[in-house]
Amino acid sequence: MNLEELATELGIDKMPQEEREVFMAQIEDTLEKRVGMHFAEHMTDAEMEEFNSVIDKDPDQAMEWLMQKFPDYVQVVQEQILIIKDDIKSLLPPKQS
């Protein structure tokens, strides 16, 4: 599942554009923090220094660095998206049938 699919499944894609953009930015920020915390917990001090050096120079290369160091990167991102989806669903009122 990607963020667009998440937005569709949760009905975020039906929100007014400005609200949708704010909501999706919050979701992206939450995802980035959760994934970052996950991998930070699994890095040595040397890896953390190397990662910080890479991200300061080129954020796009930082993702490539993570994917090389942590082959489960995509899986972790997917797991976190599903957790965020469940978190959001738990805050929504139940659907009426």
Image (spheres, rainbow, N blue to C red):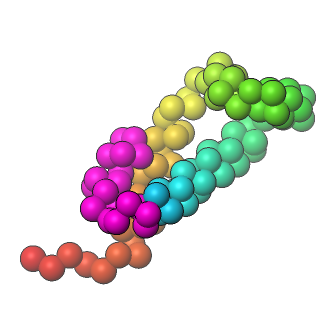
Classify residue 72 as left or right of residue 7.
right
Q: Nearer the viewer, residue 84 or 20?
A: 20
Q: Nearer the viewer, residue 24 or 35?
A: 24
Q: Quadrant of residue 11?
A: bottom left
Res. 56 in view: yes
Q: Magenta region: which residues? A: 1-20
Which quarter of the rendered picture does the C terminus lie within? Answer: bottom left
Q: How many marks?
A: 0
Image coordinates of residue 48 in percent, x first then y, are: 84, 34
Residue 52 vs 18, above or below: the answer is above
Residue 64 vs 33, above or below: the answer is above
Q: Nearer the viewer, residue 45 or 28?
A: 28
Which quarter of the rendered picture does the N terminus lie within? Answer: top left
Image coordinates of residue 84 in percent, x first then y, are: 47, 58
Q: Residue at x 77, y 32 (%)?
A: 55
Res. 84 in view: no
Residue 35 vs 89, above or below: the answer is above
Classify residue 12 as left or right of residue 22.
left
Q: Residue at x 15, y 79 (%)?
A: 96
Magenta-drawn stretch, dominant element (helix, strand or loop): helix
